[in-house]
Image (cartoon, rainbow, N blue to C red):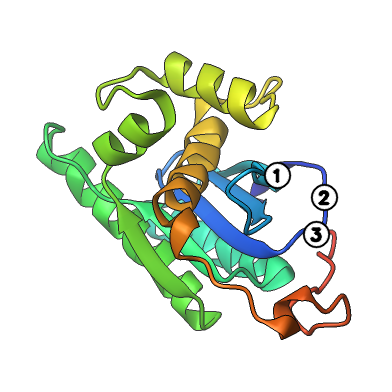
Amino acid sequence: MVAVAKVGHRLERLKIFGIDPGSQVTGFCCLHDAYSLSLHPTVADAGVIRPTKTLSHSDRLGQIHDSIFAIIDSHSPDFAVIEKGFTGINQNSALRLGETRGAIIAAIRRNGCEVIEMAPNEVKKLVTGNGHAKKEDVSLSVELLLKFRRGKLPYDVTDAVAIAYAYSLKHKSSYSISKNDLNPNSKNLNRSKELS
């Protein structure tokens, strides 16, 4: 059985789903953004997916796919932002990361959600000011900027929060608000369902 560890739920406006892909641990985050340049987004849900280690690689990919599909289905985000693959890792690791990203992207698209990719250096630069920041620095920035504490969860969760937050920062000024967006009865204000 796949292990999914998560943190809390809240309701705001624009929903951005961030994903830090990994074949052993995949971090995820649902960030709710207030459409305002003066307000910081809030972390509505965040955690990690750890597929069963004793399964074959393809079965672990299936668990990651199914878990991402269920989590996205429960939040109905406006965008899903996934970290791009990067060079500098060995061929086998690069292949596994590519397969994991493929399983995740397929789950996102099955939900009809738009997929956006961001380079790791771009995320780090936007969140910490340093495109080559370490995971500890990214985690500290996320904690200071968004008041999000990862607790005992691995850095994959703060990486996922950073990915969603970086997208929010990059595109914050391009958000537009219509009268329907301000209506509290709008269809876009669906409450998140707790995963079993």
Q: Nearer the viewer, mark 1 or mark 3?
A: 1
Q: Residue 106 in the image: x percent, y percent?
A: 41, 73
Circle 2 SS class: loop
Report whether 39 appears left or right of 189.
Answer: left
Q: Which residue is the site of mark 3?
A: 195
Q: Going 64% across and 55% down the picture, which residue do you hit?
A: 33
Q: Is residue 115 above or below residue 6?
A: below
Indicate the position of residue 108 as horizontal and vertical percent values. Answer: 49, 71
Q: Is residue 194 left or right of residue 72?
A: right
Circle 3 — which element?
loop
Earlier in the chain: of badge 2 and badge 3, it is: 2
Could you classify mark 3 by the number of other residues whose Cα lies within 10 Å: few (under 14), some (14-19), or many (20 or more)?
few
Give how far apart the Cα atoms at labels 1 and 3 are. 19 Å
Q: Secondary structure at mark 1?
A: strand
Q: Quadrant of residue 138?
A: top left
Q: Splitting the image into 4 quarters, where does residue 40 fall? A: top right
Inter-mark Cα distance, 2 to 3: 11 Å
Q: Position of residue 140 (x, y in %)?
A: 54, 17
**Residue 99 in sight from this viewpoint:** yes
Say few, some or many: other residues with alpha carbon within 10 Å of mark 1 (under 14 / 14 to 19 / 20 or more): many
